[in-house]
Image (tube, coloured by chain):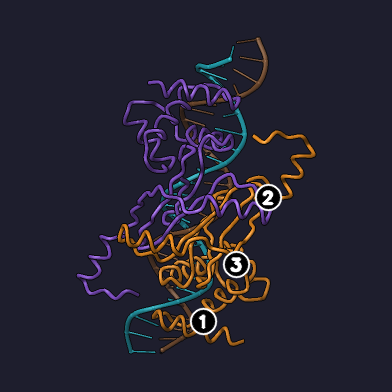
Chain colours: A orange, B purple, C cyan, D brown
Amino acid sequence: MSEISSHKEALKHSGLKNTKQRNSILNILEKSTQPLTADQIYVALINEKTAINLSTIYRVLNTLAEKNLIIKSSSVSDNKTLFELNSLEHKHHLVCVECKKIIMVDECPFEEYEKKLKEKMGFTILGHKLEIYGICNNCQKKNEKNNKPTV
Amino acid sequence: MSEISSHKEALKHSGLKNTKQRNSILNILEKSTQPLTADQIYVALINEKTAINLSTIYRVLNTLAEKNLIIKSSSVSDNKTLFELNSLEHKHHLVCVECKKIIMVDECPFEEYEKKLKEKMGFTILGHKLEIYGICNNCQKKNEKNNKPTV
DNA sequence: GTAACTGCAAATGGTTTGCATGCGG
DNA sequence: CCGCATGCAAACCATTTGCAGTTAC
């Protein structure tokens, strides 16, 4: 597993000690295709027999977020904090307001828009988060069946 | 204040009773240029001598959000839920990761991008939220003074 | 060896909820 | 007058924190 050593590098580069817990957490995040809550990470680690304390997870996540190794966001529906690896290629979310499903899309419409903002307002962009709310294909079909009016 | 009656209409249209508390909350949100936390609304109401209970505010906000009269979001930095009026014209946020300032911008780069998504994935867009993280003009200058390296 | 890190348990704080009362339609 | 809304207090639960023991470097 070459990923582990890359985590080691990343931690070192940020002036953080290379501990078993931090590596485990980074591994879980790396494997996930979705942002995870602290608790989800906890369960994942327990499942793979990795002993760890929940408060350690919170502390590690906050530290990693401070160093910009991971990205903190938060889910509106259940008000929990989400964490994901800060990979360079970013993803965006489609959130279905009915079934709460989250669909990832990888196209990003505005590298250029960011440039414009920088020139106009002197705002240096580090990243962005785009969430699109709507109704997914499935729920739409379901609604048509039930004759449910569109708002 | 013609806004009050418009709130009355909006409430009625959603099958909600027109109460003093709901109107007061909607008024506060209407006056604000930024999304507010439940607590901020509470303080604002107390300041203008409007007696209300914090749990009522939460209940009203959640009800209004369910009816899509207001929009729920959440701030990453302090993990609180934010609420704003669901006005048709939408705004976007620039969030400075250093001073936590929120700057509103009104340009939206992708009505067209939404169209594309709809065609491609059958996803009906109701709205979107764009948050751009970075460092604002001020913090940048401050950093230059202090010789702080840019990561 | 020393500062950084972790585990544990208790505290914190935003949000929700049960129940009795009040008020809108 | 009926049922939705509100106030109040207590519960809830995600997250944080103090402290003692441990580990990385």
Foreground mark, 1 or 3? 1
Question: Which residue is located at x 62 percent, y 69 percent?
Answer: A32
For mark 2, what is the residue?
A: A136
Q: Residue furthest right?
A: A145
Which residue is more in the foreground, B43 or A116?
A116
Residue A35: image quadrant is bottom right
- Image quarter where the C terminus of chain A lies is top right
Counting from the top left corner in percent of width and height, residue B59 is at 53, 34
Q: Amino acid under label 3? A: Tyr
Circle 3 SS class: helix
Give the camera-side residue of B76 and A88.
A88
Which one is nearer the viewer's eye here, B126 or B32?
A: B126
Spatial distance from mark 2 to mark 3, Cα to Cα?
A: 30 Å
Q: Which residue is mark 1?
A: A7
Element carrying mark 1: helix
The image shows residue B129 at horizontal and vertical percentages of 50, 50
Q: What residue lies at 41% left-to-right and 42% top-to-bottom?
A: B36
Q: CA distance from mark 2 to mark 1?
A: 36 Å
